[in-house]
Image (spheres, grey):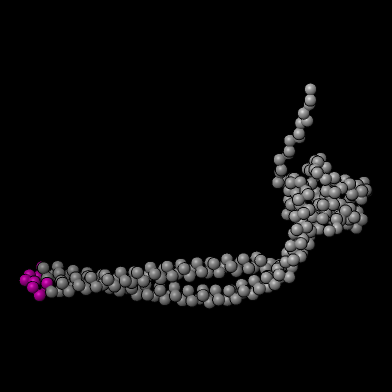
Amino acid sequence: MATTKTKKAATPIDVRETFVSLQKDFAESGISVAEKLKVLYALQQADNEIDKIQNLRGALPQEVAQIEDELEGLKSKIAHHEELIAGYEAGIEENKNKMVELDAETAKYQEQLSNISNSREYDSISKEIENLGLLREIAEKHIGEARMAIGERKDAIEAIRDRIAIREQDLGAKKEELEGIVASTSDEEKALQAKRDECAAKIDERTMSAYNRIRGSVRNHLAVVTVYNGDSCGGCFGAITPQRLVDIASGTKLVICEHCGRILVNPDAEVSE
């Protein structure tokens, strides 16, 4: 009776995984440990060169984005002021119409005064005329306040437009500088990115996940390093034991720095194009 070979279940990828936790399964891939170490080292070198190119841009991308956000905010403020101005203008028209209505009503009451025969009715109509006059004064006051507010809003818009003009000049200069750097390094960056993609395609997902995690968690972005000064980790400069140095020199064993968790490789493991 034929027996079927049970395939080992794949362990789910943990985004917190490090090279230390991968040690047992590091050899379980389509390539040997030695080749895997070479590919990882080549991947790290490609990333180092890409980092250098991106460092040439410095804070320019962030500065461009910051100015663009500022301009968007300034334009939103102008739109808000214009919306308020439209509201004030609508209020002015409303109060003007109200004044016309009050004047017509006042004229009607004044006409009635000439036909009044008793003092009680005269006093009542006079009071109505007085109230209408007060309402007209209030409407006039609202119109004056609205016109003053419109003037203030227009002054604010003018100041914002002056600021926009200055920041647009700054943005143009920053973009020109950034585009110049990008253009001068575009071909080199594309070649390095292609090399990086080629290396990454040879590495299993779990190892790549650990590589990216360590790169993103350390300031120098080094996940795979060589021996420094003959006996120290090239990433954290921690001391390496003699036995580990022998294993690193062999280029066939996965050696992890016991201080920082980076992979340590033999400098001769570098892969040429």
Q: Position of residue 80 (x, y in %)?
A: 46, 67
Q: Residue furthest top?
A: 1
Look at the image and give the residue range highlighted in magenta.
Answer: 112-120
Q: Position of residue 252 (x, y in %)?
A: 89, 46
Q: Residue furthest front?
A: 1
Q: Is residue 108 left or right of residue 212?
A: left
Which residue is pictured at 70% across the width and 68% down the height?
Answer: 182
- Quadrant in which the C terminus appears: bottom right
Which residue is pictured at 8% across the width and 73% down the height?
Answer: 115
- Quadrant in which the N terminus appears: top right
Q: Check residue 59 for magenta coloring.
A: no
Q: Is residue 157 left or right of residue 101?
A: right
In this orientation, does residue 218 appear?
Answer: no
In this orientation, does residue 62 appear?
Answer: yes
Which residue is pictured at 10% across the width and 68% down the height?
Answer: 120
> Residue 100 lies in what quarter of the image?
bottom left
> Residue 163 lies in what quarter of the image?
bottom right
